[in-house]
Amino acid sequence: MNKKTIKITTGAAIIAIFAILLIVNRQTGLMFEEIFMYFFPIPMIAFSAQYGWKSSIPVLVSMAFFAFFFGTFTTIFYATSEAMIGLVFGDMIYRKADMTKTLLVVMGLSSAVNVLNTIVLASLFGVNLSEEIAEIQKMLDSVITKSGMVLPDGILTDNYVMQMLVVSMIVLGLAQGFVIYEFSLLILRRLRFQFPNPRSIYSLFPPKWTGLVGMVAYYLYTYTLANPLSNEVLQTVIQASGMFADLYLVTFGFIGISFFLKGRLQVPAILKVIICVLIFFTVPLLVLMAGVLYIVTDYHRSCGYDK
């Protein structure tokens, strides 16, 4: 059997596996669709990891076709988007890309898909996001009142709640991307796929300018909370950017503190996690500043990690 025939046969088998997942998902009444989301990318990953993205496009189109016939409206979007993530993931394995970079790409795509699917599905099903935000505001007001907390005036505005909703969807997407990455690699190892080992997270070197930009964005975010701007669009952009900057800097703050505890104090792994979490909940600004210093300075390189 020649290579072209093997490729066509493999593609047909991959599509059949994907179709079976769709049918099982439909027959179980979509009760486990959130779980099936972690299975949908795997067939495409297995194919594109062998043949690359160009050969995988017809397979992706066929998967979307089967999703249309065997899935509901929600399944069409979820299954097709997860298959697209699988195509990119598998192609990066095919090109032997750095696995740490692959993880970040998969998490980023999963986050973007999660936000996009929520917006698209909300518009298709006639869900009014403004009404949803109003319900969230009422719920938060009730919880805050019962707990006796006092928040600054205007903190729970429509724009702020919308930003929290978007950020929560992004964080959930990042978590889903991480699970998809680890679960897929576990399956691929069982199938005897070969791929390079991931680099240590301490070898990640983001551009220094991102730390400075993140710090400025966070400062503007805190300023607009205390002094709201008259331009609502600009206010929304600044606050959304500040939230992303906060998440970005805190992430590298965790890495920086963990790196310091590991390199200077030789703290055990479990204790490192506990210390980082305690610092975050007691002095969150310290974690953010640690992220700025970790990105902007050469501390991590001076301790033995270099490109």
Image: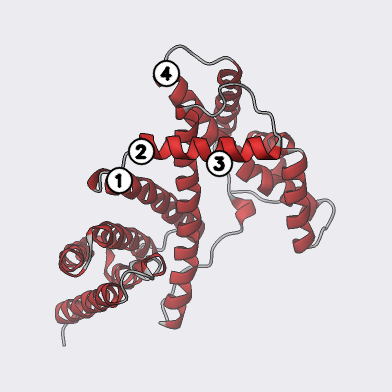
Assign a secondary structure to mark 4.
helix
Give me the disc on residue 259: none
Q: Is residue 133 left or right of residue 128?
A: right
Quarter of the image that includes the N terminus: bottom left
Residue bearing the label numbered 1: 122
In 3D space, how far apart are the residues under numbered discs 4 and 2 (Cα atoms)?
Answer: 18 Å
Earlier-in-chain disc, 2 versus 1: 1
In 3D space, how far apart are the residues under numbered discs 3 and 2 (Cα atoms)?
Answer: 35 Å
Residue bearing the label numbered 4: 232
| Residue 149 appears in the figure | yes
- The amino acid at mark 1 is Ala
Circle 1 crowding by C-alpha within 10 Å: few under 14, some 14–19, many from 20: few
Depth check, front residue: 103 or 75: 75
- The amino acid at mark 4 is Glu
Residue contact at pointers 3 and 2, CB within 8 angstroms: no
Say which residue appears at 48% left-offset and 61% top-offset. Answer: 99
Earlier-in-chain disc, 4 versus 2: 2
In 3D space, how far apart are the residues under numbered discs 2 and 1 (Cα atoms)?
Answer: 8 Å
Say which residue appears at 46% left-offset and 41% top-offset. Answer: 165
